[in-house]
Amino acid sequence: MADNTWALRGDLLDFTGEPVWGQVQAPQVRWRPDHWLLVRGQRIEAVRAEPPGPEWRRVDHSGRLVLPGLIDTHVHAPQLDVLASYGSELLSWLNDHTFPAEARYADERVAQRGAERFVQALLRHGTTAAMAFSTVHEAATDALFAVAHAQDMRLITGKVLMNRHVPAALEDDVQGAEEACRRLIRRWHGTGRCSYALTPRFAPTSTDEQLDMVAALWREDPSLYLQSHVAETQAEVQWVQQLFPQARSYLDVYDSRGLLRRRTVLAHGIWLDAQDRSRLEATGATLAHSPSSNLFLGSGLFDWRQAHEAGVRVCTASDVGGGTSLNLLRNLAAAYQVQALIGQRLTAWSALHSVTLGAAQALCLDNEIGRLEPGCCADISVWDWSEDEAIGHRLSLARGLHERVFAWFMLGDERLLRSVVVAGRAAPNIG
Ligand SMILES: [Zn+2]
């Protein structure tokens, strides 16, 4: 059992609540430098300043930053294959790059290797939990669940639903899709650390009948999740208006069917109005802000403060492959830059909270992930502050923790990752 009982030493940083917007002095930031985190089996048993007894195997990461494993609330597993595809905005990017890549996942060997590459890549980028899109294929979704399950990783995913406006090879139908969802839910929802997310790609690729089927499935089992996209580009919003003339807004296509709740995560939400924001707040649904994707595809600048002031829960996500990095530090840096372009400043605390405790709360999993707290699952990421002398010198000049952490994620990326722990076990070949 010795390998099952161990202690990690380092500088521990996490959150006890949501930091106040715009404040760099935040009492919700929990900074425990040179502490020991005691792990027994899958869980964190204790956190303390004193070294543990000899029965605890010691893993010394002194001087390194220890965070909860990062949580990516919006990412597409098959889209690692289309990262950084040149020259398109959203709708042509889907047709020219993404749909052909996703069609290849009909081949189960392609899907299996893709699932393995994706899960390994998440871990190598410091992400230990994700809410991810699979493809339209049931077998590819099975493969993705199975690979994550073998790692004991917290994964929420689902078969993509789309029965119109996509190439024939990717088109499902309402009845076949419902049957596939039911089989996948039976096999995977609640299996180990896997959960199922109903996954209509976005309103334009599902008919009214398919969205109604999703709503009916969800009413049967409210413990399921729901993930989709909303209001990413203006052209997309106009298209949705044409396709759903009875809907008050793009968001209303989902809202009018009861698809907004806790456990709903909608990517983007750039082009929403005040009534939409108030519906998100009232229903508890989450927006997954995906800044590197929004910049790369030129989709628009998300006004985080406006959403925050309306009481909308916002997480930061990679949205790979529209996003350009699985590493959430890179995406937090992009989030800061997007806010700067609209005259706002995102603190390091609001940023980091949105990929740790905030994301865990959005997924109703804050008793399991997102915190370095006894009883939580031992999902942990360990980072160097820098590996470059000039950057190390700059960090040494920081006048306080906020300045240091902010400069760390603005200047850092996955190359600083030294270790990742998933359910109490260090992932091999990292760091
Ligand atoms: Zn997306």
Image (tube, rainbow, N blue to C red):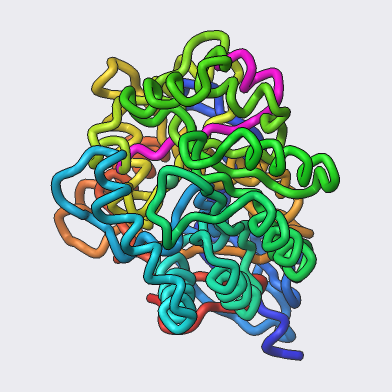
Which residue occupies 78% across, 59% down? 375
Which residue occupies 40% across, 49% down? 166
Q: Is residue 22 visible?
A: no
Give the vertical position of 205 relative to 103 (above or below).
Answer: above
Observer-nearest residue: 346 or 11? 346
Q: Quadrant of residue 294?
A: top left
Residue 278 belongs to magenta span: yes
Which quadrant is home to the C terminus? bottom left
| Image side of residue 75 versus residue 236, left or right | right
Residue 195 belongs to magenta span: no
Observer-nearest residue: 362 or 45? 362
Q: Is residue 2 visible?
A: yes
Give the vertical position of 247 relative to 113 (above or below).
Answer: above
Q: Magenta span covers which residues? A: 276-292
Where residue 284 sits: x, y (%)?
A: 69, 27
Which residue occupies 24% across, 52% down? 96
Give the vertical position of 117 relative to 203 (above or below).
Answer: below
Where residue 404 sits: x, y (%)?
A: 35, 43
Where residue 49 sits: x, y (%)?
A: 64, 60
Where residue 255 sits: x, y (%)?
A: 65, 24
| Image side of residue 418 versus residue 343, left or right | right
| Image side of residue 393 versus residue 288, left or right | left
Which quadrant is home to the N terminus? bottom right
